[in-house]
């Protein structure tokens, strides 16, 4: 059974012109792209999206960065999508990310780490709904 995850190609990666390379990794790793759009978040949107981290010391820096430029948001589908995408992107800190992962190859730093990935099925559903309406998602059924 397939399920969904939510990804962001973050502003550092878009700025560094890695959007196409990362999009290709997504396709080559076997994900189905249910929807994708390029957008620039407002600070309020970034604060809402990362609300779970609001008590963390990096919250201000993170939300400022995420609203600093264009990013691409994607709804992805695959078997065990959440775990598969986390494996594809690698550890949060690119210095700790495994060879061949997206963060190893394209991230700038711990904060500006190229991509986002949901951490659970429940959060994936919430994060997809934060950026996409149901009718924007491709239905394969
Ligand atoms: N982050 C940061 N400093 C830290 C930890 C995280 O700037 O010490 C940023 C980084 O961009 C990360 C995001 O906050 O991707 C969310 O953190 P989380 O722990 O959820 O990592 P992720 O799930 O993205 O791997
Ligand atoms: Mg996380």
Image (spheres, helix red, strand yellow):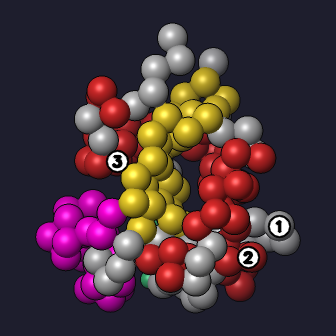
Work out whether residue 57 can be spotted. Answer: no
Instruction: Point out residue 135 in the picture as x, y percentages from the top left corner.
Output: 30, 27
Q: Residues within 10 Å of mark 3 (few under 14, many from 20)?
A: many
Residue 139 appears left or right of 21: left
Which contiguous range is marked in magenta? 39-66
The foreground one among 17 and 119 is 17
- Residue depicted at x 58% and y 88%: 109
Mark 2 to mark 1 CA distance (whole Å): 7 Å
Determine which residue is flagged by label 1.
100
Instruction: Point out residue 98 in the picture as x, y percentages from the top left corner.
Output: 80, 70
Considering every residue shown, the one lying at the far left of the view is 44
Residue 115 appears left or right of 22: left
Query: In the rendered view, would you say 88 is above or below 45?
Result: above
Mark closer to the chain start, 2 or 3 = 2
Determine which residue is flagged by label 3.
127
Q: Residues within 10 Å of mark 1 (few under 14, many from 20)?
A: few
- Residue depicted at x 73% and y 38%: 30
- Residue depicted at x 51% and y 75%: 14
The foreground one among 104 and 119 is 104
Q: Would you say residue 59 sits in the magenta stretch? A: yes
Work out whether residue 26 can be spotted. Answer: yes
Disc marking residue 104: 2
Instruction: Point out residue 67 in the picture as x, y percentages from the top left corner.
Output: 29, 77
Which element carries disc 2, helix, strand or loop?
A: helix
- Residue depicted at x 61% and y 24%: 2
Mark closer to the chain start, 3 or 1 = 1
Q: Residues within 10 Å of mark 2 (few under 14, many from 20)?
A: many
């Amino acid at each position: 059974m397939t399920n969904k995850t939510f990804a962001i190609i973050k502003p550092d990666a878009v700025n560094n012109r890695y959007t196409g390379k990362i999009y290709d990794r997504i396709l080559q790793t076997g994900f189905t792209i249910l929807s994708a759009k390029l957008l620039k978040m407002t600070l309020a949107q970034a604060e809402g999206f990362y609300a779970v981290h609001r008590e963390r010391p990096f919250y201000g820096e993170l939300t400022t960065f995420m609203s600093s430029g264009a990013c691409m948001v994607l709804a992805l589908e695959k078997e065990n999508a959440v775990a598969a995408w986390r494996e594809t992107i690698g550890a949060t800190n690119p210095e700790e990310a495994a060879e061949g992962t997206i963060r190893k190859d394209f991230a700038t730093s711990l904060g500006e780490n190229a991509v986002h990935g949901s951490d659970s099925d429940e959060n994936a559903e919430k994060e997809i709904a934060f950026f996409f309406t149901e009718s924007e998602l491709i239905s394969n059924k």
